[in-house]
Image: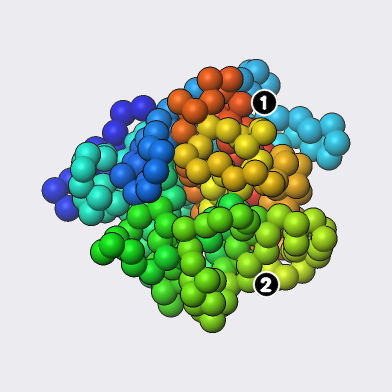
Amino acid sequence: MANIPTSPTGTPSTPISRDADFAILGAPFDFGTQFRAGARFGPRGIREASTLFSFGHAGAYDHEDDVTYLETDRVRIVDIGDADIIHTDTVSSHANIEAGVRAILAAGAVPVVLGGDHSVNIPCINAFAGEAPFHLVQIDAHLDFVDERHGVRHGHGNPMRRAAEKPYVTGLSQIGIRNVSSTARDGYEDARAMGSDIQSVRQFRALGVDGMLARIPAGQRYYVTIDIDGFDPSIAPGTGTPSHGGFLYYEVLELLDGLTKRGSIVGVDLVEVAPDYDPTGSTTTLAAQLLLNLIGRIAHNR
């Protein structure tokens, strides 16, 4: 869990092995929250919960698929620790997260970032400057498309707006959006005008998994950002902004599985896990289980 050593320029001074297929980076940053903080403890909680799945097997067998995912002789995963967070300094903290993601990309691995609040997506997307274009798939209760409010442009209500402004983000699929949101009506109008397809949980269920996948451009590179509050708080209460009416586990897993077959997932972040609001550990377990299965399917289906 040590922080990533950085050079004076902010880039990691310890190179990442080019044998790695996936690299885990913690982003324990939650200064972007508007209400309940605590997601800074998300990376630690998700890592701890992941030990539940460390059985010592040479992979993870799924009897429904009859596939052993994450076979140790085929898939290499490294954890490079946490980005250095300079408390009260959003600019420097985001820069260090971006440096970590850039180092992972330079090593040829897929970055898997553990947040942190959703503002950490901003430096993650910034790190892809110079990479090939991609389509962004967001699973979330909230649109996060605020341009600026009270002078804030890099909080956890802004990341999808900042992503849509990038020339290398070709479009957004925003899935699970529901209930009262920090984004007002004009934000929804701007999102659609800037290339977003917005679907609520009820709309997703009416479409079905295959129908939702059909709305996502095929054969593309995808970046996936998952806010844990996209799930229903009955299974994921440990988050700062829970919103009832959310997804259940298999709905999201089947969507992500289909996405790995439809194109190539080139980056992932999972954010807004705040363990202190869930003493049962259900939320951190859900996050770890989802990432385990997503990484396995990216490796198996690509």
Q: What number is the disc on residue 58?
A: 1
Q: Is residue 78 left or right of residue 199?
A: left
Q: Residue at x 60, y 39 (%)?
A: 291
Front one among 116 and 111: 116
Crowding at dot 1, Cα within 10 Å, few <14 / some 14-19 / many 20+, comes out as few
Q: How is the image coloured?
A: rainbow
Residue indicated by mark 2 = 217
Circle 1 — which element?
A: loop
Question: Marks 1/2: CA distance?
Answer: 35 Å
Can I make out residue 199 in this image?
A: yes
Front one among 211 and 299: 211
Residue 137 falls in image quadrant: bottom right
Q: Residue at x 77, y 68 (%)?
A: 214
For the N terminus, give its image quadrant.
top left
Crowding at dot 2, Cα within 10 Å, few <14 / some 14-19 / many 20+, comes out as some
Q: Nearer the viewer, mark 1 or mark 2?
A: 2
Q: Position of residue 238 (x, y in %)?
A: 53, 32
Q: Is residue 19 left or right of residue 177?
A: left
Placement of 109 over or under 134, stated as above or below: above
Q: Position of residue 228 (x, y in %)?
A: 56, 42
